[in-house]
Image (cartoon, rainbow, N blue to C red):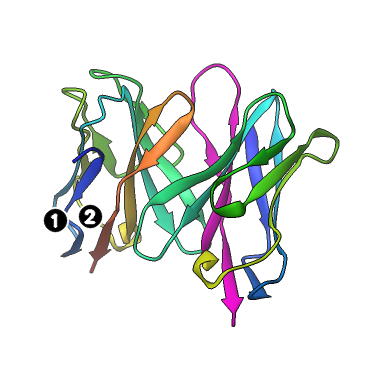
């Protein structure tokens, strides 16, 4: 069984401020972890993913996330928010090996103020 | 143009009507998925197909059916639409562990 919890349905930051979007997961086997971004009226696109190896993962658009097994977390960060980062962000978990059917979190809407 | 196309872009449908949402990909990916997205609930898997000729049920399959006659097409059918099926529907493919999403179909059932 697997599940994802995204803390905060909305996160509001000022342009230039740190972005932190929280994701906690549960998985009965070693997980694959993902962050997706969805811009208005578009489909999801992959920001970054963790499979094995280095726990700090860098993605597109300056985002990164750190896999912390002891905390079962995979929080998404960006040092300096841009207006163009305003979007919906989804965390997802999938069990490594076996049939691939990821479970998505409920999403966090990032609002960036000028 | 490589990618995933979905049709229609949006649709308003009377309850009780039959509707098929189309999904076509040209990336030759074996695995395909249908999700629905509802505000505050994220994406929920309706049906999936690991390869042409096979399908499986996801988290919320009731009221929906799929077929996978070939690699490229994965239509989703609502046999008798109900208002609770009002949602945005996304088709996705998978290569390795990475999923690729279509632009979505916004469906309203009245």
Write the residue at 74% across / 33% down: A55
Q: Does label 2 or label 1 sit earlier along the sequence?
A: 1
Classify residue A16 by image quadrant: bottom right
Q: Residue B102 location in percent, x, y? A: 30, 46
Give the residues in magenta: A87-114
Q: Is residue B61 inside the magenta stretch?
A: no
Write the residue at 52% across / 68% down: A86
In the rendered image, the vertical position of residue A15 relative to residue B72, given as above or below = below
Quarter of the image containing the C terminus of chain B? bottom left
Q: Residue B81 location in percent, x, y? A: 22, 55
Label 1 packing within 10 angstroms: few (<14), some (14-19), many (20+): few
Say which mark, if any, is on residue B33: none
Classify residue A26 by image quadrant: top right
Instruction: Name the residue tied to disc 1.
Output: B17
Give a yes or no on whether discs 2 and 1 share a subunit. yes
Task: Please state which of residues B11 and A17 is positioned toward the viewer in this rendering.
Answer: A17
Instruction: Name the residue tied to disc 2.
Output: B81
Task: Please state which of residues A18 and B46 is positioned toward the viewer in this rendering.
Answer: A18
Marks 2 & 1, CB-CB < 8 Å contact: yes
Element on which disc 2 rests: loop
Residue furthest to the bottom? A114
Question: Which chain contains the residue that carries disc 1?
Answer: B
In the rendered image, the vertical position of residue A75 relative to residue A112, given as above or below = above
Question: Which chain contains the residue that carries disc 2?
Answer: B
> Viewed as shown, does residue B44 lie left or right of A14?
left
Q: Residue B62 location in percent, x, y? A: 35, 42
């Amino acid at each position: 069984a697997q599940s994802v919890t995204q803390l905060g349905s909305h996160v509001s930051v000022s342009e230039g401020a740190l972005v932190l979007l929280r994701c906690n997961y549960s998985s009965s086997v070693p997980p694959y972890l993902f962050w997706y971004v969805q811009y208005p009226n578009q489909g999801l696109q992959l920001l970054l993913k963790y499979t094995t190896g280095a726990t700090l993962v860098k993605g597109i658009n300056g985002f990164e996330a750190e896999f912390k097994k002891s905390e079962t977390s995979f929080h998404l960060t960006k040092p300096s928010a841009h207006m163009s980062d305003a979007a919906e962000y989804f965390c997802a978990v999938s069990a490594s090996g076996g049939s691939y059917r990821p479970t998505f979190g409920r999403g966090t809407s990032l609002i960036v103020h000028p | 143009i490589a990618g995933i196309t979905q049709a229609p872009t949006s649709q308003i449908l009377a309850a009780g009507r039959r509707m098929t949402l189309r999904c076509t990909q040209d990336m030759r990916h074996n695995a395909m998925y249908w999700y629905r997205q509802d505000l505050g609930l994220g994406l929920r898997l309706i049906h999936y197909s690991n390869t042409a000729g096979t399908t499986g049920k996801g988290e919320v399959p009731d009221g929906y059916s799929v077929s996978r006659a070939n690699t490229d097409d994965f239509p989703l059918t609502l046999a008798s639409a109900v208002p609770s099926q009002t949602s945005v529907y996304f088709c996705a493919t998978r290569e390795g562990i990475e999923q690729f999403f279509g632009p979505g179909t916004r469906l309203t059932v009245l």
